[in-house]
Image: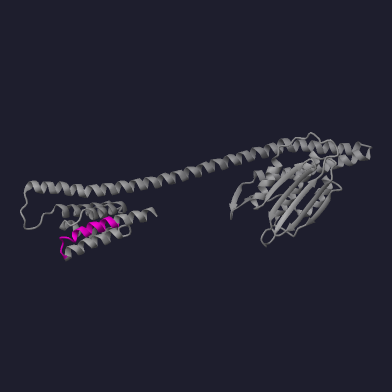
Amino acid sequence: MLPAAADAAIVTVCLLEALTVLYWADSSQTAVTFAAVVGIAVRRRLPWISVLLALPSVVLGLMTITPLVALYSLAVLERRRWLLITAGSVWLIALVQPWWGFDVELSFSALRLATGVMFTAAPIALGLLVRTRADLSMKLRDLAAARQNERQLIYTEMLMEERARIAREMHDVVSHQVSLIAVQAGALQMRSRDDTATRAADTIRSLAVQTLEELRQMVTVLKGSLHRVDGVTTDDEQPLVPQPSVADIRELVETSHPGATVNVDVPSLPAVYERTLFRAVQEGLTNARKHAPGADVSVVLTTRAGRIIVIVENGRAVDEPMALPGSGHGLIGLRERAKLLGGEAHVDSGPAGFRLTMDLPAPPAASREV
């Protein structure tokens, strides 16, 4: 918008200059002046045409502003130096060349030469300055973009190093301790004579084994290099075991909360949706087990008006809650998972209990991920 307004203002000024010639010029001189104005109107696309149309008015001494604008535009747009030097030389000759057949004093010729040099060098110098400034601004923008890409690359490398470090710690520390839990639970199961203790030990051992499998998957994911394919982040290495899905939710509830109410009524979904729903239920059950032991738990997965709704709800704690460590990362991770799918997750807690809700838009009809 701004360049168009500037062009309109310049053409208006040149037109006004041409109108002043009408008071004393003949028809041929009038035609020369208005031709120069037409050249100014097309100076951005055809700078050489603008200069050629303005040149007769320079030779005849009819106009001042219009020829300067034409030569300035040529200096801004023409990158071939030899052509610009040629145009400047012709322009200077047209300015200083006296009328043929007239004797001119030497002092007048010197003044005419100085004026011609000034009127030739000034628009060319100004045009070169503007073009150099524009080139410098473009290079600065390119440099800023290159630095941004470099910072992104450094960030990605740091992220991969951190992922590798976390993977090593999970493998060397967490996996080892969970393995010890599984071994001790197995030994307790074999030696205990109490049926209740035996069942509890069996549950602990099963959960420890399942945790080891999930840790192994997470280590594989963390070690895998990330790529962007059609805007989706994928891993080089495929999971070594099948990923959890909606079909595994009932077994998850029976394992962690026997007797909980389960209502699953959702269609077949892409794998990324099923993993997200499974993790939502898993996080809700974990919170219920930690903060409300003994409370009634209900799990509902349903579709409603093109939305997929997950609700994990528990009542007030019956037993004293255990002092287990918690970082809050689980709920943060659920919100991120929901956001990536265009939905949201939120929690409501109060004296009556805890309620985890995840609301996702139903995916478009597509083939199921494998």
Q: Which residues are magenta?
A: 11-26
Residue 141: x and y in percent read 43, 46
| For residue 101, above or below residue 215 | below
Front position in the image: 75 or 339: 339
Front position in the image: 313 or 88: 313
Camera sees residue 222: yes
Residue 159 placement, left or right of 140: right
Residue 132: x and y in percent read 33, 46
Please name the residue shown 59% across and 50% down the image. 227
Residue at the extreme right: 193
Residue 342 placement, left or right of 98: right
Front position in the image: 23 or 255: 23
Residue at the extreme bottom: 27
Residue 80: x and y in percent read 29, 53
Residue at the extreme top: 323
Camera sees residue 219: no
Please name the residue shown 78% across and 52% down the image. 300
**Residue 60 falls inside the magenta stretch:** no
> What is the magenta segment's predominant secondary structure?
helix
Residue 180 placement, left or right of 135: right
Location of residue 22 by image quarter: bottom left
Location of residue 196 by image quarter: top right
**Residue 16 falls inside the magenta stretch:** yes
Question: Dividing the image into 4 quarters, which one contains the C terminus?
Answer: bottom right
